[in-house]
Image (cartoon, rainbow, N blue to C red):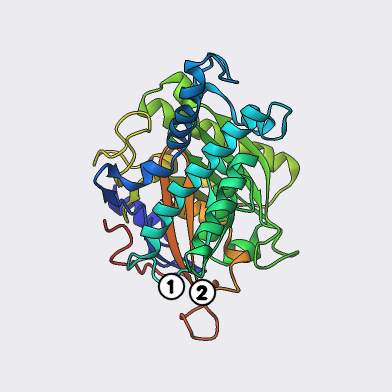
């Protein structure tokens, strides 16, 4: 299987520490404190727990503005509406939860910034599903203020792309420059513990060579958590989704590259296997006998009469890569993704002028020794 991968991926290694535009200084770092994994303090579940804590005293007096609805079942749209609604007590509860969560996020971010891997970070973008809400944006802004008040010279802001599309767009930055000179679109996959999303991404390279105008033309979503498929069933469904996108691209006359970029949870090995962190995916994806890129190449050996090339990286890394065009005014920056857990990655831009080596038109298989080290 490893020999086959060398023949079919021949662009860079999966999970590479050196990418065309950035060095991946670290990703998927798992910090701990006395209560367990630090990232658990700034996850979607953590916010719901905080919200429930503020509801508890009101529940005892029968004055809970949310009634009997469990906190983990109140959707973000409802909470956003409460923020600006006429019910001042409900608004106060949500604002209180936002403040407490921001304090937790600031605590976690502080720990990252003090670590060796995140030293001299100048900017942090925050992605993940939590960012796609007014309450998420307020929590990020409040965290930014807390850190600045403590003397950290850091900017924290929401990721620009919609969280559903950021990793798909970020997959463009896994590809070498010849892709953009010869083709106008690629296939991208974003794998999560609940959903698998596939998309066809337009490079729009002629409008903006830095890929700042790239956009998702068409996307398909499968909520695999509802179907509880086997691992093989998940790969089969994913292959079907990609084939449908290939057909749609051909019908529309796109020049689709023979390249698939994949964002996947966990620590990705050079051969495309998953070392750890894939426990929420259907079946055992960490098995030495399973290799997603190899399985997809077998199902889709060619795109447009050319051999299919596949590159897979950690989902936090790929989501962060969508910000590359907008991070050129800083040198070191990171991404935090707030979801079931807290994804993280830190980058150093590669410059044309020799400061960090080569420009984005070159790729090699360099890897950072500490890219996934535990603190």
What is the x, y in percent for residue 279?
32, 35
Dot 2, how many residues are within 10 Å of its Cα: few (below 14), some (14-19), or many (20+)? some
Q: Which residue is mark 1?
A: 120
Question: Relative to residue 35, is residue 234 depicted above or below?
Answer: above
What is the x, y in percent for residue 189?
52, 43
Dot 1, how many residues are within 10 Å of its Cα: few (below 14), some (14-19), or many (20+)? some
Kindly report which numbered mark, 1 or 2, lies closer to the viewer in this rendering.
1
Name the residue at 45% across, 24% down: 225
What is the x, y in percent for residue 134?
65, 41
| Residue 29 numbered mark, or none | none
On the rendered structure, is 270 left or right of 48?
left
What is the x, y in percent for residue 81?
69, 30
Q: Nearer the viewer, residue 205 or 110?
A: 110
Question: Relative to residue 49, is residue 68 depicted above or below?
Answer: above
Name the residue at 74% across, 46% down: 253
- Label tally: 2
Q: Quick check: can you spot residue 255?
A: yes
Residue 84: name its quadrant: top right
Question: Relative to residue 372, is residue 63 depicted above or below?
Answer: above
Q: Earlier in the sequence, mark 1 or mark 2?
A: 1
Name the residue at 63% across, 28% down: 89
Q: Which residue is mark 2?
A: 331
Residue 16: name its quadrant: bottom left
Name the residue at 29% across, 64% down: 370
The secondary element bearing badge 2 is classed as loop
Contact between labelled residues 2 and 1, with CB atoms less than 8 Å apart: yes
Q: CA distance from mark 1 to mark 2?
A: 9 Å
Q: Quick check: can you spot residue 129?
A: no
């Amino acid at each position: 299987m490893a020999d086959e991968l060398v023949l079919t991926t021949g662009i860079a290694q999966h999970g590479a520490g050196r990418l065309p535009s950035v060095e991946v200084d670290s990703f998927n770092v798992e910090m701990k404190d006395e209560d367990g994994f630090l990232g658990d303090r700034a996850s979607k579940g953590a916010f719901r727990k905080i919200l429930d804590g503020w509801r508890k005293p009101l529940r005892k007096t029968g004055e809970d503005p949310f009634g009997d609805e469990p906190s983990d079942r109140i959707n973000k749209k409802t909470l956003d509406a409460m923020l600006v609604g006429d019910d001042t007590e409900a608004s106060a509860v949500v604002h209180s939860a936002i403040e407490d969560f921001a304090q937790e996020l600031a605590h976690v971010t502080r720990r990252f910034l003090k670590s060796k891997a995140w030293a001299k970070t100048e900017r942090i973008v925050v992605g993940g599903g939590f960012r796609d809400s007014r309450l998420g944006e307020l929590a990020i802004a409040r965290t930014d203020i807390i850190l600045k008040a403590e003397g950290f010279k850091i900017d924290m802001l929401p990721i620009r792309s919609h969280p559903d599309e950021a990793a798909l767009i970020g997959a463009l930055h896994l590809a070498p420059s010849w892709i953009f000179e010869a083709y106008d679109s690629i296939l991208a996959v974003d794998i999560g513990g609940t959903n698998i999303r596939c998309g066809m991404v337009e490079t729009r390279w002629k409008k903006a060579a830095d890929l700042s105008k790239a956009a998702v033309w068409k996307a398909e979503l499968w909520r695999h958590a509802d179907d509880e498929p086997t691992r093989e069933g998940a790969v089969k469904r994913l292959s079907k989704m990609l084939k449908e996108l290939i057909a749609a691209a051909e019908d529309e006359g796109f020049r689709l590259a023979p390249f698939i970029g994949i964002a996947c949870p966990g620590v990705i090995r050079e051969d495309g296997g998953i070392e750890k962190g894939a426990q929420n995916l259907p079946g055992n994806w960490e098995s030495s006998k399973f290799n997603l890129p190899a399985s997809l190449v077998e199902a889709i050996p060619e795109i447009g009469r050319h051999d299919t090339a596949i590159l897979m990286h950690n989902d936090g890394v790929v989501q962060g890569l969508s910000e590359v065009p907008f991070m050129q005014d800083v040198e070191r920056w990171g991404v935090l993704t707030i979801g079931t857990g807290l994804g993280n990655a830190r980058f150093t831009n590669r410059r044309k002028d020799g400061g960090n080596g080569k420009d984005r038109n070159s790729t090699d298989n360099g890897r950072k020794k500490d890219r996934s080290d535990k603190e």
